[in-house]
Image: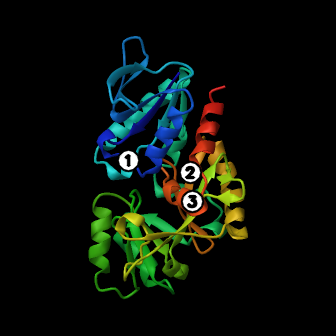
Amino acid sequence: MKCVFLVNDVADIDPSTTTAMLIQTASTRGFGVFVGDIAKLGVGVDDAVRARAIRHPDRSEHDLVLAPGDLVVIRTNPGRDTRVGVHQAGLDLLALAQHQGVVVLNEPAGLRRASSKLYSTRIPPAFRPRALVSRDPKVLREFVKTSATPSVLKPLSGTRGTDVFKVQPNDPNLGQIIDVLTRGGMAIAQEYLPEATQGDVRVIVLDGEPLRVGSAVAVVRRKPSGADFRSNVHIGGVPAATEFTPRLREIVQTVGPLLMSDGLPLCGLDVIGDKIIEINVFAPGGLSDANQFYGVDFTGPIMDSFVAKRS
């Protein structure tokens, strides 16, 4: 059987990323492993979904027919790609493949539901920051100006801390920031959590539970560096080992059933203080750091879980 990993661009896969680690682990599970660009999916006159992909590890190129029992692992990141229509069509094609008996993870319907930060509104209010979503500058400005604390403004869809701003109620650049954020769509205004000075915590969730190997849990703190309040690793945040606290356990227990009901077995929760600020459902990362910090291999249980879903 085939295991096909779908990404934004095959050439962009770094060997240190979670995606590369999962590809390597899948190759030890007896699959024929392939890696393809989401844009190279299609459907033939026989209604079978096809993919143009590179075989791992020899990098030979193949035209594949996705067949019942095959496993497709979606590791795309629509927020880092200008081809919005390609990603939407890709999920439609993969939903068809799933209907035909292909195992697709995470499930396309769930990825559609969770494709923007608006998905976090399905979390109980006690577990998320106070926030609103709008494209109306007046609404966003009112939220900021009436807040007792600083606010965070960011696009409804995005990744890696891009276009995320911490603003004060009297910020002289507030109008320009709101204009930038709403020019291409809706924005989120969110209360700033003071614990952000200590960074955020990424918890990997597998099948509704914290990803665990023995006593080790895949949880990594990301600390901001310098004057930047953002802790994303791609903009200078520093990863560090951290404790899996009772509050983190409570958060996972609260959100896990929602993720499973939406067909999202592998996710990353980003937590500041005791609140979830984001749910990563397309290509959650951080396993390279977690493996290093705790001296275990977290990718094995993930692939074991995925393989078990084929039966």
Which residue appears at 45% of the width and 45% of the height?
19
Q: Nearer the viewer, residue 21 or 275?
A: 21
Q: Which residue is mark 2?
A: 267
Which sits in the foreground, 62 or 124?
A: 62
3 and 1 marks in contact (CB < 8 Å)? no
Q: Secondary structure at mark 3?
A: helix
Query: Quick one: label 3, few (<14), some, or many (20+) residues within 10 Å?
Result: few
**To which residue does mark 1 refer?**
78
Place of residue 138 in the rendered image (x, y in percent of width and height, measured from the top left)? 37, 73
* Residue occupying the point 61% across, 54% down: 296
Front position among marks 3 and 1: 1
Which numbered disc, 2 or 3, marks the residue closer to the eye?
2
Q: Is residue 171 visible?
A: yes
Point out the tag, 3 or 1, that comes first from the N-terminus: 1
Direction from residue 114 to residue 158 in the image, left or right: left
Q: From the viewer's perspective, is residue 57 above or below residue 226?
A: above
Query: In the rendered structure, which disc, 2 or 1, sits on the residue that comes first in sequence?
Result: 1
Label 3 is placed on what type of residue?
Thr
Quarter that holds the C terminus: top right
